[in-house]
Amino acid sequence: MANKIMKWMYVMFTGTTLLLTSCAGTKQVTMESTQEIENPAALVNQFKTEMSNARNNQLNVLVPDTFANAEKRLSSAEKGLERGGEIADIRENVTEGRTFLRTAEEKSGMVKKMIPETIKARDMARSAGATKFEGDYGALERNFLDLTYAIETNDLNYAQKNQESVTKGFRQLELRAIKEKTLGQVRELIRSAEKAGAKKIVPKTYTRAENTLSEADAFISEQRYQTDVISKKADDALFEAERLGHIMVLSEQMKSRDPEENSIFVEGIVEKITKKLSATDMRNEQVDIQVDNILGSIDTLQKDRQFMVEKAKTQEAQIKEMTEKYQMEVDNLTRQVASLEGKTKEEQTEKKRLEDEKRAVEERLAAERRFNELYNEVRNYYDPDEAEVYKQGYQLVIRLKSVKFPVGKAVIMPDNYQLLSKVQRSIRTFGEPDVVIEGHTDSTGSAAVNEQLSKERAMAVMEYLLQNRTLPAEKMISVGYGPDKPLASNATAEGRAINRRIDVIIKPVTAGE
């Protein structure tokens, strides 16, 4: 029954299409014949544009045979143009090609109605990046072309028989592409660790990494379009896979040492943390007590920081309230003086306007002086090899020279903490300014990858500043420009090193007002 319905739909559509095509084709030829074509190149170029648009609309795969006929006419017209052929012949090829193109557009509508799920599955697979599986995707694409060609040529039995398998193939390839994109690196890390003996050396950590990967894989299989959850699960799996590698290295190092050396190694880590926190040295106590000492010191510092933040906000509110109060008093006194002077209303208004303009100029000059003072102060925070600080209008730019990231990653390493603490101090010097953090890379590698890496590195710096309560989240944004804004030539190693940078742009709220 379904087969008969598909045949009936196609026969009805084909009859209508042929009728419309015949009428439209006759009308087009008549219209063309009444026009003087003075520029055959323009005619061919216009048809070429129409064919490009048709290809963008996938007519080359939805109705491959008819589209191929249109392409042949375009090729003939282009060759005629190159050889300086007769305008009438060029026009005929274009006219016939357009007739085929209109037919292709009309037939494509029927194809879309007959296999909408297959077309959707193909589009989703391509969007997911399935084309990188060249062999498997190429075979499936050929099956898809066979399917659309069958519909185009009225072989509905073939279309009905093969539609489901092609749809299923694209959906499987889409799922594979999603998993490869999100979990490919995780699989590779775990596979490398397994080859190095992770199952025996660190079995618990290995099992945890495997389980996290399996959980992410299973979720993607069931909910492939839940991108936010997938991203979180993929990040968790990558974290555990990277952790697995480091635990293996540490385990091997500890295996090569005797128990006392391992104990002293752990004690040294605790000592470093204790000194950094300016906490009491408690290495003469049990390990649990030493850990409690560290956690207590951290808790105290966090509470103290929160107290200072709240205190600053309270003081700011008080200052604002006092300023408004004093301003009201000044305005009241001004009105009283004007009244006592017996000035007219117009004269009072003009006097106040002039006074306001004078005050605005004085405030702007004061703001400029203050900005320059703070600029000089911030510039002295950095050594020449750490950062370059300069003014850009009423903005301050801190170009970080020595901030370093692991190759291809966006992780803030401890070596950067001291420099970023200076950035934090610089921002706070201006109170609560607006801050933009820009990430830049050199041109080595893919532009898309560099752009994403620059975004992630700028975001990592912003997250560090947010975690250290430098500014409220709404006062900071991060952006990545990849290799688009180089400062030097990427042709040399020195130039590429200069172009790999983080720029922190501070925009004081009162600057320029």
Image (cartoon, rainbow, N blue to C red):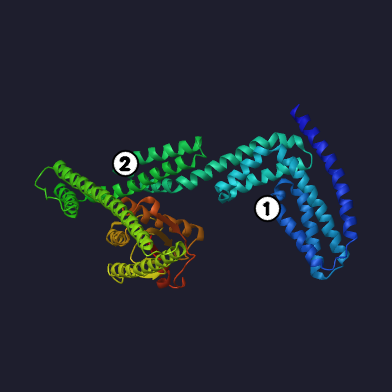
Q: CA distance from mark 1 to mark 2?
A: 49 Å
Other residues around mark 2 within 10 Å, as few (<14) / some (14–19) / many (≥20):
some
Q: Position of residue 203 (x, y in %)?
A: 31, 40
N-term-proximal mark, 1 vs 2: 1
The residue positioned 65% from the left and 37% from the top of the image is 117
Whether 95 is drawn above or below 402: the answer is above
Q: Position of residue 436 (x, y in %)?
A: 41, 59
Side (left or right) of 420 relative to 132: left
Q: Quadrant of the N terminus?
A: top right
Q: Position of residue 413 (x, y in %)?
A: 31, 56
Whether 450 is drawn above or below 118: the answer is below
The residue positioned 81% from the left and 61% from the top of the image is 76
Element marked by disc 1: helix
Side (left or right) of 180 relative to 407: right
Determine which residue is flagged by label 1.
56
Q: Amino acid type of disc 1?
A: Asn
Determine which residue is flagged by label 2.
205
Looking at the image, which is closer to me, 471 or 25? 471
Q: Which mark is residue 168?
A: none
Q: Amino acid type of disc 2?
A: Thr
Element marked by disc 2: helix
Whether 16 is drawn above or below 311: the answer is above
User: Does the CB distance between marks 1 and 2 fall below 8 Å?
Assistant: no
Which picture quadrant has residue 400?
bottom left
Residue situated furthest top in the rendering: 1
Looking at the image, which is closer to me, 161 or 35? 35
Side (left or right) of 407 relative to 13: left
